[in-house]
Amino acid sequence: MVDLKQVRFLLIGAGNVGRRFLGLVARKEQVLRERAGLQLVLSGVADSSGIAANPEGLDLEWILALKAGGRGVAEIPDWGQPGVAALDMVRGVPVDLLVDASPANMLDGQPGLGCIELAISQGTDVVTANKAPLALAFSRLDELARAHGARLRFDATVAGGLPAVNLGRRDLAVADVHRIEGILNLTTNYILTRMAAEGLGFDEALSKAQQEGHAEADPSLDLEGWDAANKLIILAHSVLRYPASLDDVEVEGIGGVTPQALREAAANGQQIKPLAVAEREDQGYRLWVRPVALDAAHPLASLGPQQMGIVYHTDISGVITAAIVEDTPQPTASAVLRDVVELYGRAAGGTP
Protein backbone atom coordinates (compact mmCIF):
# COMPACT_ATOMS: atom_id res chain seq x y z
CA MET A 1 0.00 0.00 0.00
CA VAL A 2 1.34 3.44 -1.00
CA ASP A 3 2.02 5.82 1.89
CA LEU A 4 0.29 9.02 0.73
CA LYS A 5 0.95 12.59 1.76
CA GLN A 6 -2.26 14.61 1.48
CA VAL A 7 -1.78 18.22 0.43
CA ARG A 8 -4.76 20.57 0.63
CA PHE A 9 -4.52 23.59 -1.65
CA LEU A 10 -6.29 26.72 -2.81
CA LEU A 11 -6.27 27.90 -6.43
CA ILE A 12 -6.52 31.55 -7.40
CA GLY A 13 -7.42 31.97 -11.05
CA ALA A 14 -9.29 29.39 -13.11
CA GLY A 15 -8.35 30.65 -16.55
CA ASN A 16 -6.15 28.97 -19.16
CA VAL A 17 -3.36 27.95 -16.77
CA GLY A 18 -5.49 27.33 -13.68
CA ARG A 19 -7.97 25.13 -15.54
CA ARG A 20 -5.22 23.12 -17.13
CA PHE A 21 -3.51 22.69 -13.77
CA LEU A 22 -6.69 21.24 -12.28
CA GLY A 23 -7.03 19.03 -15.34
CA LEU A 24 -3.51 17.70 -14.80
CA VAL A 25 -4.18 17.05 -11.11
CA ALA A 26 -7.22 15.00 -12.09
CA ARG A 27 -5.57 13.25 -15.04
CA LYS A 28 -2.35 12.46 -13.18
CA GLU A 29 -3.99 11.43 -9.91
CA GLN A 30 -2.74 7.84 -10.10
CA VAL A 31 0.74 8.87 -11.24
CA LEU A 32 0.98 11.37 -8.38
CA ARG A 33 0.03 8.64 -5.94
CA GLU A 34 2.41 6.00 -7.28
CA ARG A 35 5.45 8.07 -8.18
CA ALA A 36 5.31 10.97 -5.73
CA GLY A 37 3.20 9.59 -2.89
CA LEU A 38 0.90 12.59 -3.17
CA GLN A 39 -2.82 13.16 -2.91
CA LEU A 40 -3.72 16.72 -3.91
CA VAL A 41 -7.02 17.99 -2.52
CA LEU A 42 -8.58 21.22 -3.82
CA SER A 43 -10.11 22.98 -0.82
CA GLY A 44 -10.99 26.25 -2.55
CA VAL A 45 -10.90 28.03 -5.89
CA ALA A 46 -11.40 31.69 -6.83
CA ASP A 47 -12.26 33.31 -10.15
CA SER A 48 -13.94 36.53 -11.26
CA SER A 49 -17.35 35.25 -10.10
CA GLY A 50 -16.30 34.68 -6.48
CA ILE A 51 -15.12 31.53 -4.74
CA ALA A 52 -16.05 27.94 -4.02
CA ALA A 53 -14.63 26.47 -0.82
CA ASN A 54 -14.87 23.18 1.03
CA PRO A 55 -11.99 22.25 3.36
CA GLU A 56 -12.72 18.57 2.72
CA GLY A 57 -12.29 18.92 -1.01
CA LEU A 58 -14.10 20.01 -4.17
CA ASP A 59 -14.92 17.83 -7.17
CA LEU A 60 -12.36 18.71 -9.86
CA GLU A 61 -14.40 17.32 -12.74
CA TRP A 62 -17.38 19.39 -11.68
CA ILE A 63 -15.30 22.57 -11.66
CA LEU A 64 -13.70 21.77 -15.01
CA ALA A 65 -17.10 21.13 -16.59
CA LEU A 66 -18.45 24.37 -15.14
CA LYS A 67 -15.55 26.40 -16.50
CA ALA A 68 -15.73 24.68 -19.90
CA GLY A 69 -19.31 25.94 -20.08
CA GLY A 70 -18.22 29.51 -19.48
CA ARG A 71 -19.59 29.67 -15.93
CA GLY A 72 -18.00 30.81 -12.67
CA VAL A 73 -17.00 28.70 -9.68
CA ALA A 74 -19.39 30.67 -7.45
CA GLU A 75 -22.24 28.78 -9.12
CA ILE A 76 -21.19 25.47 -7.54
CA PRO A 77 -24.09 24.32 -5.33
CA ASP A 78 -23.47 24.31 -1.57
CA TRP A 79 -19.89 25.57 -1.81
CA GLY A 80 -20.12 28.56 -4.17
CA GLN A 81 -19.97 32.10 -2.71
CA PRO A 82 -20.63 34.82 -5.31
CA GLY A 83 -18.69 38.05 -4.96
CA VAL A 84 -16.32 36.81 -2.25
CA ALA A 85 -12.73 37.91 -2.86
CA ALA A 86 -9.82 35.50 -3.24
CA LEU A 87 -8.09 37.23 -0.31
CA ASP A 88 -11.00 36.31 1.98
CA MET A 89 -10.71 32.69 0.87
CA VAL A 90 -6.99 32.65 1.68
CA ARG A 91 -7.73 34.18 5.07
CA GLY A 92 -10.57 31.82 5.94
CA VAL A 93 -9.69 28.38 4.53
CA PRO A 94 -6.72 26.65 6.21
CA VAL A 95 -4.57 24.71 3.73
CA ASP A 96 -1.00 23.57 3.10
CA LEU A 97 -0.52 25.32 -0.23
CA LEU A 98 -1.67 28.30 -2.28
CA VAL A 99 -1.46 28.02 -6.08
CA ASP A 100 -1.64 31.37 -7.84
CA ALA A 101 -2.62 31.25 -11.51
CA SER A 102 -4.31 34.65 -11.53
CA PRO A 103 -3.68 37.15 -14.35
CA ALA A 104 -0.46 39.17 -14.13
CA ASN A 105 -1.28 42.73 -13.10
CA MET A 106 1.93 44.66 -13.65
CA LEU A 107 0.55 47.86 -12.11
CA ASP A 108 0.31 46.68 -8.50
CA GLY A 109 0.45 42.87 -8.65
CA GLN A 110 -3.06 42.43 -7.28
CA PRO A 111 -4.90 40.28 -6.41
CA GLY A 112 -2.06 37.77 -6.58
CA LEU A 113 0.45 39.79 -4.55
CA GLY A 114 -1.89 40.31 -1.61
CA CYS A 115 -2.94 36.67 -1.57
CA ILE A 116 0.66 35.46 -1.71
CA GLU A 117 1.71 37.81 1.09
CA LEU A 118 -1.18 36.70 3.29
CA ALA A 119 -0.58 33.00 2.62
CA ILE A 120 3.13 33.28 3.41
CA SER A 121 2.45 35.27 6.58
CA GLN A 122 0.22 32.39 7.68
CA GLY A 123 3.06 29.91 7.05
CA THR A 124 1.42 28.51 3.92
CA ASP A 125 3.59 27.40 0.99
CA VAL A 126 3.03 29.11 -2.38
CA VAL A 127 3.48 27.96 -5.97
CA THR A 128 2.79 30.66 -8.53
CA ALA A 129 2.61 31.03 -12.30
CA ASN A 130 1.94 34.76 -11.88
CA LYS A 131 5.08 36.79 -12.63
CA ALA A 132 3.75 40.17 -11.47
CA PRO A 133 4.16 39.73 -7.68
CA LEU A 134 7.73 38.49 -8.11
CA ALA A 135 8.76 41.12 -10.64
CA LEU A 136 7.38 43.86 -8.38
CA ALA A 137 8.25 42.53 -4.91
CA PHE A 138 10.67 39.61 -5.10
CA SER A 139 12.89 40.62 -2.17
CA ARG A 140 9.93 41.36 0.10
CA LEU A 141 8.27 38.03 -0.64
CA ASP A 142 11.52 36.11 -0.22
CA GLU A 143 12.22 37.72 3.16
CA LEU A 144 8.62 37.14 4.28
CA ALA A 145 8.84 33.46 3.36
CA ARG A 146 12.06 33.04 5.32
CA ALA A 147 10.57 34.81 8.34
CA HIS A 148 7.46 32.61 8.43
CA GLY A 149 8.95 29.27 7.39
CA ALA A 150 6.93 29.15 4.16
CA ARG A 151 8.26 28.02 0.79
CA LEU A 152 7.83 29.91 -2.47
CA ARG A 153 8.21 28.26 -5.88
CA PHE A 154 7.75 29.99 -9.25
CA ASP A 155 9.29 28.03 -12.13
CA ALA A 156 6.22 28.69 -14.30
CA THR A 157 6.73 32.46 -14.20
CA VAL A 158 9.61 32.46 -16.72
CA ALA A 159 9.19 30.97 -20.21
CA GLY A 160 6.15 28.84 -19.39
CA GLY A 161 6.93 25.16 -19.08
CA LEU A 162 10.66 25.59 -19.64
CA PRO A 163 12.49 24.88 -16.33
CA ALA A 164 14.47 28.10 -16.69
CA VAL A 165 14.29 29.12 -13.03
CA ASN A 166 14.79 25.65 -11.56
CA LEU A 167 17.70 24.91 -13.89
CA GLY A 168 19.45 28.06 -12.76
CA ARG A 169 18.70 28.14 -9.06
CA ARG A 170 18.86 24.39 -8.32
CA ASP A 171 21.11 22.70 -10.87
CA LEU A 172 23.55 25.62 -11.08
CA ALA A 173 23.38 26.47 -7.39
CA VAL A 174 27.17 26.45 -6.89
CA ALA A 175 28.12 27.66 -10.36
CA ASP A 176 29.06 31.24 -11.16
CA VAL A 177 26.62 32.30 -13.89
CA HIS A 178 28.26 35.16 -15.74
CA ARG A 179 25.75 35.49 -18.59
CA ILE A 180 22.14 34.54 -19.23
CA GLU A 181 20.61 34.81 -22.70
CA GLY A 182 16.98 34.03 -23.25
CA ILE A 183 14.07 34.18 -25.61
CA LEU A 184 11.56 34.53 -22.81
CA ASN A 185 8.53 35.90 -24.65
CA LEU A 186 6.76 33.67 -27.14
CA THR A 187 4.68 36.41 -28.76
CA THR A 188 7.65 38.41 -30.02
CA ASN A 189 9.56 35.33 -31.15
CA TYR A 190 6.46 34.12 -33.00
CA ILE A 191 6.09 37.44 -34.81
CA LEU A 192 9.73 37.85 -35.84
CA THR A 193 10.07 34.20 -36.87
CA ARG A 194 6.94 34.26 -39.04
CA MET A 195 7.99 37.57 -40.58
CA ALA A 196 11.42 36.17 -41.46
CA ALA A 197 10.25 32.78 -42.70
CA GLU A 198 7.17 33.85 -44.64
CA GLY A 199 7.82 37.45 -45.56
CA LEU A 200 4.87 38.69 -43.50
CA GLY A 201 4.49 42.29 -42.45
CA PHE A 202 4.46 43.12 -38.75
CA ASP A 203 0.69 43.67 -38.49
CA GLU A 204 -0.08 40.48 -40.38
CA ALA A 205 2.24 38.42 -38.17
CA LEU A 206 0.72 39.96 -35.04
CA SER A 207 -2.78 39.19 -36.29
CA LYS A 208 -1.83 35.55 -36.86
CA ALA A 209 -0.32 35.38 -33.36
CA GLN A 210 -3.58 36.65 -31.90
CA GLN A 211 -5.68 34.27 -34.00
CA GLU A 212 -3.62 31.30 -32.79
CA GLY A 213 -3.70 32.36 -29.15
CA HIS A 214 -0.04 33.41 -28.93
CA ALA A 215 -0.75 37.11 -28.38
CA GLU A 216 -3.15 39.03 -26.14
CA ALA A 217 -5.80 41.37 -27.48
CA ASP A 218 -3.57 44.14 -26.09
CA PRO A 219 -0.03 42.82 -26.72
CA SER A 220 1.80 46.03 -25.80
CA LEU A 221 3.70 44.56 -22.81
CA ASP A 222 5.02 41.81 -25.07
CA LEU A 223 5.80 43.93 -28.11
CA GLU A 224 7.52 46.68 -26.13
CA GLY A 225 9.74 44.18 -24.31
CA TRP A 226 8.38 44.61 -20.79
CA ASP A 227 7.12 41.06 -20.40
CA ALA A 228 10.62 39.72 -21.09
CA ALA A 229 12.07 42.39 -18.79
CA ASN A 230 9.85 41.24 -15.93
CA LYS A 231 11.00 37.67 -16.42
CA LEU A 232 14.62 38.80 -16.54
CA ILE A 233 14.10 40.48 -13.15
CA ILE A 234 12.91 37.16 -11.69
CA LEU A 235 15.98 35.38 -13.06
CA ALA A 236 18.26 38.11 -11.71
CA HIS A 237 16.87 37.71 -8.18
CA SER A 238 16.49 33.95 -8.08
CA VAL A 239 19.48 32.73 -10.10
CA LEU A 240 22.01 35.55 -10.00
CA ARG A 241 21.11 36.77 -6.50
CA TYR A 242 21.17 40.26 -7.95
CA PRO A 243 18.39 42.50 -6.56
CA ALA A 244 17.45 44.32 -9.74
CA SER A 245 14.31 46.30 -10.52
CA LEU A 246 12.68 47.20 -13.81
CA ASP A 247 14.49 50.55 -13.68
CA ASP A 248 17.73 48.60 -14.11
CA VAL A 249 16.68 47.00 -17.41
CA GLU A 250 17.39 48.61 -20.79
CA VAL A 251 14.32 47.77 -22.86
CA GLU A 252 13.67 48.01 -26.59
CA GLY A 253 10.66 46.41 -28.25
CA ILE A 254 10.38 44.76 -31.66
CA GLY A 255 8.27 47.47 -33.30
CA GLY A 256 11.27 48.84 -35.19
CA VAL A 257 12.19 45.53 -36.84
CA THR A 258 11.29 45.75 -40.53
CA PRO A 259 10.96 43.02 -43.17
CA GLN A 260 13.98 44.58 -44.86
CA ALA A 261 16.08 44.23 -41.68
CA LEU A 262 15.06 40.58 -41.44
CA ARG A 263 16.00 39.97 -45.08
CA GLU A 264 19.39 41.63 -44.63
CA ALA A 265 20.06 39.54 -41.52
CA ALA A 266 19.14 36.36 -43.39
CA ALA A 267 21.47 37.33 -46.23
CA ASN A 268 24.29 37.50 -43.66
CA GLY A 269 23.37 34.10 -42.22
CA GLN A 270 21.68 35.63 -39.17
CA GLN A 271 18.26 35.60 -37.49
CA ILE A 272 16.84 38.56 -35.57
CA LYS A 273 15.51 37.33 -32.23
CA PRO A 274 13.95 39.09 -29.20
CA LEU A 275 16.76 38.57 -26.70
CA ALA A 276 16.77 39.11 -22.93
CA VAL A 277 20.28 39.22 -21.44
CA ALA A 278 21.92 39.52 -18.04
CA GLU A 279 25.70 39.86 -18.31
CA ARG A 280 28.32 40.27 -15.60
CA GLU A 281 29.61 43.81 -15.37
CA ASP A 282 31.87 45.13 -12.60
CA GLN A 283 30.28 44.05 -9.29
CA GLY A 284 26.84 43.44 -10.73
CA TYR A 285 25.01 42.68 -13.96
CA ARG A 286 23.85 44.64 -16.95
CA LEU A 287 20.30 43.71 -17.93
CA TRP A 288 18.80 44.40 -21.32
CA VAL A 289 16.02 43.34 -23.69
CA ARG A 290 16.10 44.08 -27.42
CA PRO A 291 15.97 42.44 -30.86
CA VAL A 292 19.40 41.10 -31.82
CA ALA A 293 20.79 39.58 -35.04
CA LEU A 294 22.16 36.19 -33.96
CA ASP A 295 24.57 34.14 -36.01
CA ALA A 296 23.13 30.85 -37.27
CA ALA A 297 25.41 28.91 -34.89
CA HIS A 298 23.88 30.55 -31.82
CA PRO A 299 21.69 28.02 -29.96
CA LEU A 300 18.71 30.41 -29.86
CA ALA A 301 18.88 31.45 -33.53
CA SER A 302 17.04 28.38 -34.81
CA LEU A 303 14.10 28.49 -32.39
CA GLY A 304 10.76 28.25 -34.16
CA PRO A 305 7.70 30.49 -33.72
CA GLN A 306 6.25 28.46 -30.84
CA GLN A 307 9.50 28.14 -28.93
CA MET A 308 11.28 29.84 -26.06
CA GLY A 309 14.76 29.10 -24.78
CA ILE A 310 17.54 30.01 -22.38
CA VAL A 311 21.34 29.78 -22.35
CA TYR A 312 23.38 29.79 -19.14
CA HIS A 313 27.10 30.63 -19.40
CA THR A 314 28.89 29.37 -16.28
CA ASP A 315 32.32 28.92 -14.77
CA ILE A 316 32.14 25.20 -13.87
CA SER A 317 29.13 23.79 -15.72
CA GLY A 318 29.93 24.89 -19.25
CA VAL A 319 27.30 26.50 -21.45
CA ILE A 320 23.86 25.00 -20.93
CA THR A 321 20.97 25.52 -23.36
CA ALA A 322 17.33 24.54 -22.86
CA ALA A 323 14.36 25.17 -25.13
CA ILE A 324 10.67 24.34 -25.28
CA VAL A 325 7.90 24.13 -27.86
CA GLU A 326 4.82 25.59 -26.17
CA ASP A 327 1.81 25.73 -28.45
CA THR A 328 -0.73 25.83 -25.58
CA PRO A 329 -0.61 26.88 -21.90
CA GLN A 330 -0.45 23.24 -20.78
CA PRO A 331 3.35 23.18 -20.31
CA THR A 332 3.00 26.22 -18.04
CA ALA A 333 0.40 24.34 -15.99
CA SER A 334 2.72 21.36 -15.88
CA ALA A 335 5.47 23.60 -14.48
CA VAL A 336 3.13 24.51 -11.62
CA LEU A 337 2.53 20.83 -10.94
CA ARG A 338 6.28 20.21 -11.18
CA ASP A 339 6.87 22.74 -8.41
CA VAL A 340 4.18 21.16 -6.23
CA VAL A 341 5.79 17.75 -6.62
CA GLU A 342 9.22 19.24 -5.91
CA LEU A 343 7.87 20.64 -2.63
CA TYR A 344 5.92 17.65 -1.37
CA GLY A 345 6.78 14.58 -3.44
CA ARG A 346 8.30 11.47 -1.93
CA ALA A 347 11.68 11.96 -3.66
CA ALA A 348 11.93 15.51 -2.31
CA GLY A 349 10.78 14.46 1.13
CA GLY A 350 8.71 17.60 1.30
CA THR A 351 11.74 19.63 2.31
CA PRO A 352 12.79 23.12 1.14
Image: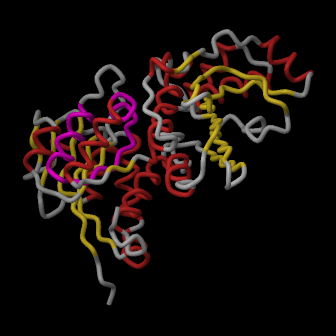
Quadrant position of residue 184: top right
Magenta span includes 296:
no
Q: Position of residue 55 (x, y in %)?
A: 12, 59
In the rendered image, which quarter contains the N terminus? bottom left
Q: Is residue 155 above or below residue 82?
A: below
Q: Which residues are magenta?
A: 111-136
Q: Does the magenta run of residues contain 127?
A: yes
> Which colouring convention does the figure follow?
secondary structure
- From the viewer's perspective, is 9 left or right of 269? left
Residue closest to the eye, 307 or 277: 277
| Rendered-image quadrant of the C terminus | bottom left
Image side of residue 260 versus residue 70, left or right: right
Task: Give the image location of residue 169, x and y in percent.
Answer: 50, 51
Who is closer to the viewer here, 91 or 282?
282
Q: Does 231 sit above or below residue 56?
A: above
Q: Residue at x 37, y 37 (%)?
A: 130
Residue depicted at 10% across the width and 52% down the height = 93
Q: Residue furthest front?
A: 283
Q: Which residue: 41% across, 79% down?
A: 34
Q: Quadrant of residue 132?
A: top left
Q: Main secondary structure of the magenta part?
A: helix
Q: Is residue 105 left or right of residue 279?
A: left
The structure residue drawn at horizontal position 17% and vertical position 39%, both measured from the top left corner, is 86
Q: Nearer the viewer, residue 261 or 136?
A: 136
Q: Is residue 43 left or right of residue 288?
A: left
Q: Residue 78, percent across and down?
A: 7, 52
Indicate the position of residue 155 as horizontal and vertical percent values: 45, 48
Residue 218, placed above or below residue 312: above
For this orientation, the residue located farthest to the bottom is: 1
